[in-house]
Every structure is written in structure tokens, then in C-alpha cells.
Amino acid sequence: MYRTHTCGELRLADAGKEVTLAGWVQRVRDKGSLVWIDLRDRYGITQLFLQDGVSDPKLMEQARTFGREYVIQAKGTVIERESKNPNMPTGEIELRVSEFKLLNASKVPPFTIEDVSDGGDDLRMKYRYLDLRRNPVRKNLELRHRMAILVRNYLNEKNFLEIETPFMIKSTPEGARDFVVPSRMNPGEFYALPQSPQQYKQLLMVAGFDRYFQIVRCFRDEDLRADRQPEFTQIDCEMSFVEQEDVLQTFEGLAKHLFKEVKGLEFGQFPRMTWHDAMKYYGSDKPDIRFGMKFVELNDVVKGKGFSLFDNAELVVGICAEGCSEYTRKQLDGLTEFVKRPQVGAGGMVYVKYNTDGTFKSSVDKFYTPDDLKLVAEKFGAKPGDLMFILCGDAMKTRVQLNALRLEMGNQLGLRNPDVYAPLWVIDFPLLEWDEETQRYYAMHHPFTAPKPEDEALLDDPSKWGEIRANAYDIVMNGVEVGGGSIRIHDRVLQNKMFHTLGFTDEKAQEQFGFLMGAFEYGAPPHAGLAFGFDRLCSLFGGADSIRDFIAFPKNNAGRDVMSGSPSPISQEQLDELQIALNLKS
Ligand code: ASP
């Protein structure tokens, strides 16, 4: 037997027991007549102890040969510690060693395997298997495991079946870019890795499975950011014979279950906001509603006073930061710089200070009298001591810019506490989204999303396409989109109409989606679904921004696995077998 206990298990009640432990040497402290070794495994750390006059000198010599990360086995007696460590679960005991066995030596690790490591990001990614030995990283994966089990149990209770769908599928270039896999047996032909199991889960509904889920890997060849990985995991779900309300209730239930079990938090009904309101009041389709600072539109009180920037703008809109009227010149300049950064893209920013003595000070005092500014303040519902920020320009662009400023203010004022959770449903997304570059409409969610029945007739009038609302919804938490879905089109005629709207000819639609369309002719039930981004959900519950920390072996920002060195060239032989000739541009 390699071990009788784990390194996190022994307590004072075990004193006197003869035990065997196995694990990694975290460190050796050699005080000459006393030697301590911290032995670590997944479960914790136990202190091993040797002492001149009590321990065999040979054993003490052996202990001194162990380096960091050596794998050893230690036999001995559990004894009560003289100086106890209340910060460690095993801190009241130590193991007086009677026998060691070296199981495997280790090179000196390139960084310290401790809670706070001295290794930089790149180094830790290269030696990810060592990074994974560290507590914080291991804890993230433990959380992920726990959440996966909770999800499975919850959905199982609700009659969902977990069904696997293929990873090698037909490429459908709608949405993001596909990763493709060449087929040796069918030269010149390619599979695609699924961006999501969307069409398969809809086929499962046609097949009568009624409630499906899968914790499943998805692949999207997109530019990467901190919260994006080329392969990521969804909790993918689909249900038959349901309306939007059923879907929202079911998955709100799942989210509440997770909050309760993992965080001990209870919620009433999650608030709901239409996409239109989300954009109007927060400039974002995923508003962070942990704090207020809702947008206030000011066209009617600021126009016509001779300030041409406002006069010529489609929209003048602002936010009010409570209690910030004492902001210094430097702070205001900093915020102006912030909104002017290319990532935000505003031309500038107007501020109005509502001083505690009731007077006003603004960057547009030349154009606005104190009475004018009072009207502005009333619009905001501002009080003395508040500070208002105003942006102007094209309506949608300005809202998006103001969203960036609102979030920045939220950060500066400490209003975005990661321990506070504010879930929200955003509903009634637009069905279609215009793309300037290609001069056509794209499905905002995906082409299988149903329009709201009351907006369906607008599909016949191309001038109204931008106004059609979809039966689509996102679940948002703390400004992060953690999931989304829709009621699907299950009627072939409507689906055809949708494809036409998206610029597909009949042939093209048939070629791309023929199998799904065909299936719809054999009794497709009304159905709907949703997918959670599982990595994001885990990072949110774990209180971190990056999903990378919750994936055992993630890729870096260039899409590379620096540990294994992928992607990598393949041999000429492999290329020949696939009948692929490279034509590299650089
Ligand atoms: N397949 C969709 C997605 O990946 C989710 C859904 O509509 O169920 O976003």
C-alpha cells in the first residue's frame, strides 16, 4: 500500500497511529539537529519531523537529500506538535518519520509551487502540469468539477438526457470561423469542428428526446481575448413543447441551484430587461446592474443653447456619479483621456459638477447658465455633491462609449465587487443585425432563431428588417454574458423565409442546412434552448476575470498551447496522404 492516509487528513485524534503518506516535497527545513519536511498532495500538507537523538541518523541524512518536488513515501507515527499552526487543517500534528522511500526525484522546478508563485504567466503555461500543483489553480478546477456535477444532477432531476453529438461535422460558415479537419478518405473535403451542437440538438428534438443537455466542447476560430479560448465548454440544452417562459424558468432554476450550492446565495426572480432598454439605459447588451448610474438622455434640455457639439448630435446622454463633485482637475482629465482612447473612441467629455454649496461648475459654462445646468441636474435627479458626465454624437456609438465610462466609474468607485452577484435576463434581442462591410443582414443569434410572432409579418418588408425582435434571450451576470438561447423556428416555410432574408438562395440554403430543413418536414415539435458558457460561469463563481484559470490546459492569446507546442507543422507524408499542398503567404 502506497499510503494509508492523504496529506490533508490527519488530526490530533490520530495521534499515536502508525501511518504511511506519499506526496511531493514542498520544502525541507534543516536546523541541524531538527529536520522538517512539508509533504504535499492534492488534499493538503503534512509536516514530517526528524530529530537528532530520536530519529535514525541515516534517516536524517536521507531527508537532507530530498529536493523540492521529489516524490517520497514516509512511514511514521502521528504525534502532537509542540508549536501548532492554526492556519493549517493538519497544523496540530506532525509525523515522526521511521522510514523513507524515494519514489522519484525531480529537477528543480522553474518556479515556486506555492500559492503565490514567482513564475511569470508564460513560464507557468509552459509547465502547466507544475502550475496545476498549486492550490489556487487546483481549487479552480475543483470548483469546475463541482459545478459540472451540480449541473448534471440538476438537469437529470428535471428529465434532461445527456447525449453526445459529433465533433466532426459539416462546415456552416454562418457565425464565427470554423476550425476544419481534412478528410484523408475524401480528398479535398473537410469536416468542421462544431461551433456549438446547435443543429444536432434541434435534430434530437425532432427525434423526440424532448429534453437534452450536454457539457460539451465547442470550437471557434476567433481572435482571442482574456475571456475567449478557441476551444471552450458549453452547458448546451434544448427542450421541446416549451415557450420562452418555460425556458427562462428552467435555467434560472439551474443558476439559482448553483448559487445556492456553491455560494450559499439565494435569489428571488431574476430581473428582466429588453435589449432595447439595455442599450438605452446601459449602452450594453450585457449590463452590469450591480450598480446604478443609468443613462439619462438630455436632448430636450441641452439643445438650442449655442453649443454646436450638442446641437448637432443625434444623442446627448450622460451618467451621474453620486458624491463625486470633489473630483480634481487631474481626475477629470484622466477620465477625458479614458474616453478618448481608441478602444472607447469618444471625441471628448463634458462634466457638470453640482457642488455641495448648490452652485455648478462645468466644462461648458460658456454656453449654459446655472439655471440651464439646474435643469440638467434635475433630469439626472442629481443632488449637491454629485458629478455628471455627458457624451454626445451618433446615438448607438455614444451609448457604447458611455457604457465604457460607466464601467470605469464603477471600477473607480469600487461598485463592482466580485463577491456581489447581479443576474439578469436580457430579452427581445433584434432578430437581424446589419453589417456595413458585406452590406447584408446577419442573424444576431443564429439563423434558427424565431422572430416574435407579432413581428413575423415584418419579414415581408425589407425596410423593417432591422426592427424585428427575436424570441431570444441572454443570461447576464455582473456584466458578463454567461448564456444565451432562443425559441427556434420549427416551420419550414418560416425557416426558408429567414434564409432568404439572410441572402441565401434556395440552393445554397439546401446545400448548407438541407439535412435540418429536411428533418423539419417530419414533424418537428416546437422547441427552444439555451447554452451557458461553462468556463465563464466557473470563472464568475470563482471570482476571476480570465476563463483560462478554469481550464486545465488552455491556449495562450495567440491560440497556442506553449506546453505541447501546438499548432505545429505536419510532415510532408501526412500532407501527401491528405493530398494537401501548402501555399503559405509568408
Ligand atoms: N447554440 C447557441 C450558442 O452557441 C446557443 C443556443 O441558442 O442554444 O450560442
Image: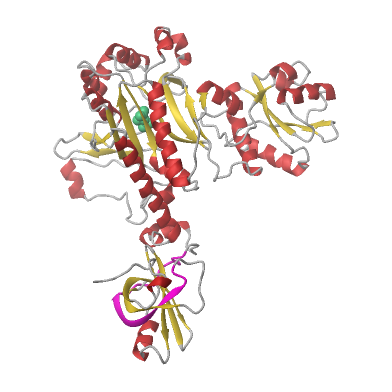
Q: Residue furthest front?
A: 13
Ligand 1 lies in quarter:
top left
Q: Say which of 94 and 391 sits in front.
A: 94
Is 55 situated above or below 539?
A: below
Is 581 situated above or below 474?
A: below
The image quarter containing residue 249 is top left
Residue at image x 44%, y 26%?
A: 473
Q: Say which of 526 and 153 sits in front.
A: 153
Q: Is residue 453 magenta?
A: no
Q: Say which of 528 and 450 sits in front.
A: 528
Quadrant of the image containing the N terminus: bottom left
Quadrant of the image containing the C terminus: top left
Look at the image and tell me whether residue 176 can be seen.
no
Span colored in magenta: 90-114
The image quarter containing residue 485 is top left
Give coordinates of residue 416: x percent, y percent: 59, 42
Give coordinates of residue 95: x percent, y percent: 39, 77
Residue at image x 25%, y 25%?
A: 205
Give coordinates of residue 382: x percent, y percent: 74, 29
